[in-house]
Amino acid sequence: MIHQSLKHLSYTALFTAGAVLLSGLSFPAGPARVFPFQHAINVLAGILIGPWYGTVAALLAGLIRMSLGTGTIFSLPGGIPGVIMVGLAYRYLKKDWVAFIEPLGTGPIGATLSALVVAPYLGLTGTLAFFQSAFLASSIPGCLIGFLLVRALRKVSRFSLGEQESPGSP
């Protein structure tokens, strides 16, 4: 039990650090910054450590990115729902294709929170359509990158990705 918790905490730290280190590869989109690698990391975190540790990684990465100026407040609603969706879906389905569920958390949920709660609270403008298009422009390529990384890591025998799919499994 302690070994598993330590493993999850280590992965949480690695995913947080990876998101922060790659955060320079983002671009502005209105009041938000579009960062596809956060969504790729969300896929990896959701599959490897589940929705709750993955949420901690996304939260910490967002807070650190905001403090460094490489992220905005929108990194929280834009990142956290996606990892929760992937983590929950993987917990029940155990299939790598759940990576493509990440945009469902980021688009409809994250964009709605951003447009209807965060932006008005900060006195900023931004329509739901704007946030959805900006977040999906980041999330769709990010989940594809994450899916490809998961598949590549499955081929490396030293990596433990939890329950692995075997080629002949249903």
Image (tube, rainbow, N blue to C red):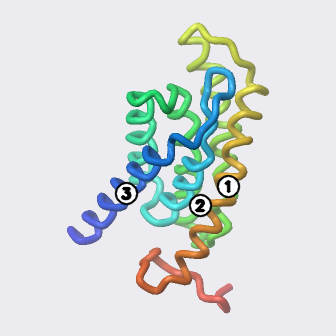
Q: Earlier in the sequence, mark 1 or mark 3?
A: 3
Q: What separation in Å lies between label 1 and label 3 (alpha carbons)?
A: 22 Å
> Which circle, 1 or 3, is nearer the viewer?
3
Q: What separation in Å lies between label 2 and label 3 (alpha carbons)?
A: 22 Å
Outermost residue, front direction? 24
Q: Amino acid at mark 3?
A: Leu
Q: Nearer the viewer, residue 21 or 46?
A: 21
Q: Which residue is mark 2?
A: 89
Q: Nearer the viewer, residue 36 or 100?
A: 36
Q: State yes or no: discs 1 and 3 in contact (Cβ < 8 Å).
A: no
Specify the quadrant that holds the N terminus.
bottom left
Residue 133: image location, x then y, percent: 77, 34
Residue 103: image location, x then y, percent: 68, 48
Up the image or down, 154 lies above or below 58; here it is below
Question: At 58% from the left edge and 56% from the top edge, which residue is drawn?
Answer: 86
Residue 118: image location, x then y, percent: 56, 20
Q: Residues within 10 Å of mark 2 (few under 14, many from 20)?
A: many
Q: Residues within 10 Å of mark 1 (few under 14, many from 20)?
A: many
Question: Which image quadrant for residue 14?
Answer: bottom left
Q: Amino acid at mark 2?
A: Ala
Q: State yes or no: discs 2 and 3 in contact (Cβ < 8 Å).
A: no
Q: State yes or no: discs 1 and 2 in contact (Cβ < 8 Å).
A: yes
Q: Nearer the viewer, residue 135 or 168?
A: 135
Q: Which residue is mark 3?
A: 14
Q: Earlier in the sequence, mark 1 or mark 2?
A: 2
Q: Which mark is residue 101?
A: 1
Q: In the image, is 95 to the left or to the right of 59?
A: right
Q: Earlier in the sequence, mark 2 or mark 3?
A: 3
Q: Secondary structure at mark 2?
A: helix
